[in-house]
Amino acid sequence: MVPLDVAATWTRMLSVTAGAPAAIGAPGPATRIRGKAALSWIEGPWLGILDFQGVKRCEREVLDPWLSEHAEPLLLVRHLLLSKPLVDDVFIDLTPQAREAMPEGWRDAPRPVLILAPAGRSRPERRREYLVALSQLRIPLVAGGSELWAIREFDVELLLALAQLADPAERAAFRAALDPSQTRLFDQQLPAARAAVLDDLVGARDEEGAVAADLDGLSSLHPNAHPLALYSAVERAHNRRRAEKERTQFSARTIEARLSARGFPEPGGPCTPAFAQRACAIEPLLPGDLQRLFDADELLAFRGGD
């Protein structure tokens, strides 16, 4: 087992059960945009790829059995089929549980791919390795729809803590280290934190911000576009506004947004009166927000996202 900082872990658990996200980034199958579940855009579950590069061996030894026994069955319920976790080489193979649960014909059509990467642990170049590995998979699962992949980053320390607390002895030791006034609350919050983290992994909860607001706005204009296509266009519009040093080739969370992240300015045209009237009829927008949404709309239309 890995020693846990009781105070820090307990504080993080409480923050997550209070609404703070434990994973952020691109939408997952449980994401709801304008009340519509992301799963409904493409029939069948998504492919989830956990990347453990940057996760220590002792941490993997705790996470692997917990994921298989406790987490994966619940992620399957949340419409995410898992591959075997990646470590160094990016080699994609479904877990035994995922193969058993895989619907008939699932491999024969493009599916959205959600890569779950440990926040703050991955090298920027890792994203190039994802792209190469996915492009080399000569199967219909990704061959016809490989642009529908993106990255969510998860709190590996919290996931590790929940994995250890699934063990009765570890749970008892952690509970004994808490202030006695907190033990009853701990008993209530532990299952709530576990449920919240699993929801976050598949995109049911996310951070608030300009990206989320633009994603919601763009989806109102293009209700039939896939959430990952919407997110790609929004992220690319945001990347245009990054400082040159921040627009690196590997900074983006989606394939589409990488096109605007090569260190070169990518100019966009001014918002047209027709678009302004169309967008503001749904919701009043500030000029800067309107221009960003216009950029995303243009990018989505260019790639045929509708």
Image: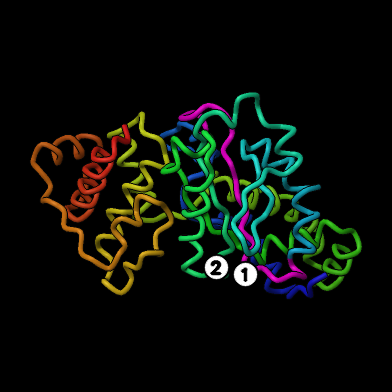
Q: Give the quadrant of residue 46.
A: top right
Three-letter amino acid code at the position of disc 1? Gly
Q: Give the quadrant of residue 107.
A: top right
Q: Quadrant of the N terminus?
A: bottom right
* Rendered residue at 35%/50% (across/down): 256
Rendering coords of residue 15 (x, y %): 60, 62
Q: Which residue is mark 1?
A: 54
Three-letter amino acid code at the position of disc 2? Ser
Q: Quadrant of the C terminus?
A: top left
Vertical order, 104 against 89 (above or below): above
Helix or strand or loop: what does disc 2 sit on? loop
Q: Give the left or right position of residue 215, taking residue 125 as reference.
A: left
For label 1, the crowd category at 10 Å Cα-Cα, with few meaning under 14, some 14 to 19 and many 20 or more, is some
* Rendered residue at 24%/42% (across/down): 297
Rendering coords of residue 237 (x, y %): 27, 53
Residue 250 inside the magenta-drawn segment: no
Residue 56 inside the magenta-drawn segment: yes
Q: Which residue is mark 2?
A: 122
Vertical order, 287 against 304 (above or below): below
Callouts 1 and 2 close, C-beta under 8 Å: yes
Residue interval drawn in magenta: 39-59
Q: How is the image coloured?
A: rainbow
Helix or strand or loop: what does disc 1 sit on? loop
